[in-house]
């Protein structure tokens, strides 16, 4: 209610408005997008939606195929309000797509706005909010999208990340960010890094034809115990799924070399590693994907043996079937419910006579929660950390397209790549529908984030700057270490205050002296008995000299410059107010004799 009130303030004025569509997994809502000085609003027009896998007969020849509107299954949306009065609506998001409602997002809760593709057209935006929700809006053309993006950027939302008109593309955004450097330094997990790359490359939960893509990391689905210390446990991340089996790869190469078509470029794989069908295949047991799968098959489910029923069987298929090269989705690493038939849906009976229920898990998994935990452990393992950049090069990097992709056996059907077809230029309705269906249903390659340079590998734990990984692996050595400090560097006075930075340890002694030691919280090569680098200072600097500098050229009350004092004529009064805790520590330390100086190991 507060957000709605902020969005419809009386002092709000309209900046621009245009026709738009809101894209969700459950359907596409046609309406108008309104940008005001206080909020961004999408007003649903209530136009009928067309089927997920077919275009409307009455749709415009320039409009993409729209998913159908299905049974409401979403929870209440706090940003969904009743059109006209701005009050919160009790209707679900899916029901609101039918019309008569609007979504309102006050600028104060907008965290980021990123450019997106829709059906391989650069025509969409995704709006990210502070409550971690996101909304996908298609504007219909690149020109209209840029107008909306410029209008929002010009308003400078209070909590929004910087919006650069000249750097709104995925590759430019990655260059401006420090994501890759942080991942290399092990400051973020493999999972978080993959999610960040997916987001920058235009993958989103709002459009199942551009769903986030994750790699298969485990290759052992038969052992009773999963050994993450053995390299053979893991999939080869330097190769695409289609190239993992040597025998299949030879057949694929032969087909590639012999392919000759005047209109269609050569390709290794006719199917894709990520598509709407793959998302529905994996998430069959959860809504709204259960309903979407049911609609896809014309009001029934596919044969039970062709549905997702066994992880090991699925892995065998993607490494042997000529037409099956699907990768995974993020839910494999955090959502155990996707492997359980929690809604007791009748999925049919397999040829063995057994009713299809929960997904069959490998022997090393006790239950879905254990399976997901071990999947996540494998993803964050040292083996995957050392090789994940090779997979990133295939999906998001320089091996995604061109000669490098051909050498890596990583070329897909040409309509899966952005820029290979101009949808807006197609005038034939039949050809337009066929092209849209191909793009929507058979996969879209993510936006390329690295076009020329290879992706850097991750640093080893010993080479990381923080040393925190060593500390977690060696908890017994997280203790106090007595550090030898020359007398000249301490003046015989105990430490009163300690400040530790990334390269220096600064000590203020009870004798008002500053001591600067060299300190690196990393793990050395083992020659030192300390789990960090410590080089003590040879002499101390006089804090009194710093105070004299304050008195000579310091700044007085209210920022007024003080007149320079002549310290050679005698003591100079310096008005310094110490922090209460520091002052108390100085008084206490001055009354005691110096004791051994101790430093913390491993940064703590």
Image: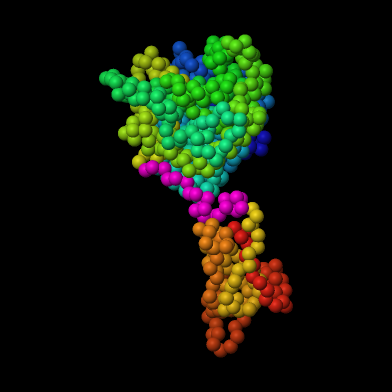
**Is residue 371 depicted above or below 490 in this figure?**
above
Is 410 or 179 nearer to us in this picture?
410
Image location (x, y in percent) of residue 16 = 48, 34
Farthest residue in the left direction? 262
**Is residue 497 depicted above or below 51 in this figure?**
below
Image location (x, y in percent) of residue 520 = 53, 61
Residue 509 visible in the picture: yes
Is 12 or 55 nearer to us in this picture?
55
* Horizontal side of residue 116 vs 362, given as left or right: left
Residue occupying the point 60% across, 83% down: 572
Image location (x, y in percent) of residue 545 = 55, 79
* Horizontal side of residue 419 vs 39, given as left or right: left
**Is residue 374 depicted above or below 45 in this figure?**
below
Say which quadrant the C terminus sits in: bottom right
Q: Which residues are magenta?
A: 453-474
Q: Based on the displayed image, in which of its 4 quarters is residue 142 positioned?
A: top left
Is residue 462 located in the magenta-colored stretch of the structure? yes
Residue occupying the point 56% across, 14% down: 305
Is residue 556 located in the magenta-colored stretch of the structure? no
């Amino acid at each position: 209610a507060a957000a709605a009130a902020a969005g419809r303030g009386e002092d709000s004025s309209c900046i621009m408005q245009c026709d738009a569509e809101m894209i969700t997994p459950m359907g596409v809502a046609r309406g108008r997008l309104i940008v005001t000085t206080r909020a961004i609003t999408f007003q649903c027009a209530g136009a009928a939606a067309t089927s997920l896998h077919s275009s409307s007969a009455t749709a415009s020849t320039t409009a993409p195929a729209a998913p159908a509107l299905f049974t409401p299954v979403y929870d209440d949306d706090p940003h969904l309000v009743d059109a006209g009065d701005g009050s919160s609506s009790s209707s679900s998001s899916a029901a609101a797509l039918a019309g008569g409602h609007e979504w309102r997002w006050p600028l104060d809760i907008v965290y980021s706005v990123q450019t997106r593709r829709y059906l391989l057209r650069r025509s969409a935006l995704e709006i990210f909010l502070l409550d971690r929700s996101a909304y996908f809006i298609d504007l219909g053309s690149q020109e209209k999208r840029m107008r909306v993006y410029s209008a929002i950027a010009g308003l400078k939302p209070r909590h929004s990340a910087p919006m650069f008109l000249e750097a709104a593309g995925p590759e430019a955004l990655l260059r401006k960010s420090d994501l890759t450097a942080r991942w290399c330094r092990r400051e973020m997990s493999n999972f978080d890094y993959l999610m960040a790359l997916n987001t920058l490359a235009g993958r989103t939960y709002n459009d199942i034809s551009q769903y986030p893509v994750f790699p298969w990391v485990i290759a052992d689905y038969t052992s009773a115990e999963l050994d993450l210390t053995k390299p053979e446990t893991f999939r080869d991340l330097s190769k695409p799924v289609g190239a993992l089996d040597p025998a299949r790869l030879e057949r694929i190469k032969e087909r590639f070399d012999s392919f000759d078509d005047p209109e269609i470029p050569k390709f290794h794989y006719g199917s894709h590693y990520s598509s709407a069908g793959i998302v529905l295949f994996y998430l069959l047991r959860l809504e709204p994907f259960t309903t979407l799968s049911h609609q896809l098959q014309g009001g029934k489910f596919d044969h039970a043996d062709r549905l997702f029923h066994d992880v090991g069987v699925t892995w065998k298929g993607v490494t042997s079937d000529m037409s099956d090269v699907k990768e995974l989705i993020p839910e494999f690493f955090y959502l155990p419910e996707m492997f359980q038939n929690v809604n007791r849906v009748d999925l049919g009976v397999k040829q063995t006579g057994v009713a299809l229920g929960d997904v069959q898990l490998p022997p090393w998994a006790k239950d879905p929660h254990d399976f997901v935990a071990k999947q996540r452990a494998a993803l964050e393992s040292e083996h995957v950390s050392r090789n994940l950049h090779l997979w990133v090069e295939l999906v998001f990097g320089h091996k995604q397209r061109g000669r490098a992709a051909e050498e890596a056996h990583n070329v897909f059907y040409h309509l899966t790549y952005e820029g290979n077809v101009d949808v807006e230029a197609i005038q034939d309705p039949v050809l337009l529908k066929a092209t849209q269906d191909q793009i929507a249903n058979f996969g879209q390659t993510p936006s390329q984030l690295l076009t020329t340079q290879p992706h850097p590998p991750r640093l080893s734990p010993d080479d990381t700057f923080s040393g925190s990984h060593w500390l977690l692996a060696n908890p017994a050595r997280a203790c106090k270490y007595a550090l030898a400090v020359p007398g000249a560097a301490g003046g015989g006075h105990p430490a009163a205050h300690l400040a530790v930075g990334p390269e220096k340890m600064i000590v203020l002694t009870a004798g008002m002296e500053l001591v600067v030691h060299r300190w690196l919280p990393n793990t050395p090569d083992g020659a030192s008995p300390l789990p960090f680098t410590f080089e003590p200072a040879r002499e101390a600097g006089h804090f009194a000299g710093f105070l004299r500098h304050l008195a000579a050229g310091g700044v007085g009350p209210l920022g007024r410059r003080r007149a320079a004092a002549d310290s050679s004529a005698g003591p100079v009064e310096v008005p310094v107010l110490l922090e209460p805790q520091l002052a108390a520590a100085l008084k206490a330390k001055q009354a005691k004799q110096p004791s051994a100086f101790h430093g913390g190991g491993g940064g703590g």
